[in-house]
């Protein structure tokens, strides 16, 4: 695992990924307000390799997860106290592994000239190294993610691949700072993996594994029990 250091917390005055807002509104005659972030929608892809009967996931360092874990190690403070800005060196930082998560291959919907399927295809190629035709992507569903803060929509797809579809190592775009490790989860271990709390993962991983077991069990002759 790579070393994480030289951490400094600073205000975020502008970002191409998110924008904070406060909305004032009236609900049943009661005036209220809510703070939210405007972000891009996204796509995710559950990838199943039919050659090796395993799921293809990505593993990467997530700064937001890491900082949440770091906050747990700091002395307790009141909710009204502002986070300290500047170098975060008041306590020993947790290991980099504290910020690593297992996820579905995914990406932002930030290319208006491409369909959701085309964006999903690009992400599978860039992150996992598989070349999947657009017509081989099956939409599972779409849902709202982060409803308390963002309300963005994520659309989930399913793709079956074989070793013949593997045309590269994946790993994401290095020029965009992506450092992604491709992970294989054997089919017979998938549900234990999904419920193993020691393996930090997104809800998308858990939901998609359950979807697979509910919808593809007969095709691959698997048990639906955990």
Image (cartoon, rainbow, N blue to C red):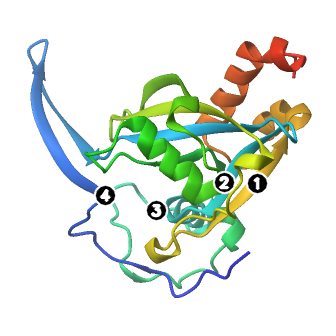
Which of label 4 and label 2 is nearer to you? 2
Q: Which residue is drawn at 44% across and 26% down?
A: 143
Q: Which of marks 3 and 4 is in front?
A: 4
Mark 4 or 1: in front is 1
| Residue indicated by mark 1 | 183
Question: How packed is label 4: few (under 14 Cα within 10 Å), some, or many (20 or more)?
Answer: few
Instruction: Please give the name of the residue rendered at 71% of the width and 67% of the height, measured from the top-left corner.
Output: 97
Residues tagged 4 and 1 counted as in contact (Cβ below 8 A): no
Q: How far apart are marks 2 and 1 (CA)?
A: 6 Å
Q: Considering depth in this image, is 76 or 113 the residue closer to the camera?
A: 113
- Give the image location of residue 209, x and y in percent: 72, 29
* Residue 195 as seen in the image, left or right of residue 117: right
Label 2 with label 1: CB-CB less than 8 Å: yes
User: Does residue 100 appear in this view?
Assistant: no
Give the mark, 4 or 1, whose residue is nearer the N terminus: 4
Could you tell which of marks 1 and 3 lies nearer the N-terminus?
Answer: 3
Determine the CA span between mark 3 and mark 2.
Answer: 35 Å
Residue assigned mark 4: 17
Q: Quadrant of the N terminus?
A: bottom right
Badge 3 vs badge 4, beta-carbon distance below 8 Å: no
User: Foreground residue, 110 or 133?
Assistant: 133
Image quadrant holding the C terminus, namely: top right
Contact (CB < 8 A) between labels 4 and 2? Answer: no
Going from N to C along the chain, the mark reached first, 2 or 1, is: 2
- Which sits earlier in the primary sequence, circle 3 or circle 4? 4
As helix, strand or loop, the secondary structure at mark 1 comes to strand
């Amino acid at each position: 695992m790579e070393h994480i250091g030289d951490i400094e917390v600073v205000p975020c005055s502008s970002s191409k990924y998110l924008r904070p807002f406060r909305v004032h509104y009236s609900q049943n005659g009661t005036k209220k307000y809510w703070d939210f972030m405007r972000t891009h929608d996204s796509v995710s892809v559950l990838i199943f390799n039919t050659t090796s009967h395993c799921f293809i996931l990505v593993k990467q360092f997530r700064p937001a997860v890491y900082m949440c874990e770091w906050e747990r190690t700091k002395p307790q403070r009141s909710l009204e106290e502002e986070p300290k800005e500047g170098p975060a060196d008041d306590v020993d930082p947790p290991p980099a592994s504290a910020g690593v998560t297992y996820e579905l291959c995914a990406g932002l919907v930030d290319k208006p000239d491409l369909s959701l399927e085309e964006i999903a295809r690009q992400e599978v190629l860039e992150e996992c190294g598989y070349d999947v035709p657009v017509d081989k992507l099956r939409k599972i569903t779409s849902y709202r993610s982060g409803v308390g803060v963002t309300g963005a929509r994520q659309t989930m797809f399913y793709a079956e691949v074989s070793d013949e579809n593997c045309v590269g190592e994946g790993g994401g775009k290095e020029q965009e700072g992506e450092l992604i490790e491709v992970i294989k989860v054997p089919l017979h271990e998938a549900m234990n993996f999904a419920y193993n709390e020691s393996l930090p993962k997104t809800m998308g991983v858990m939901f998609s594994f359950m979807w697979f077991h509910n919808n593809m069990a007969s095709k691959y002759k698997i048990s639906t029990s955990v």
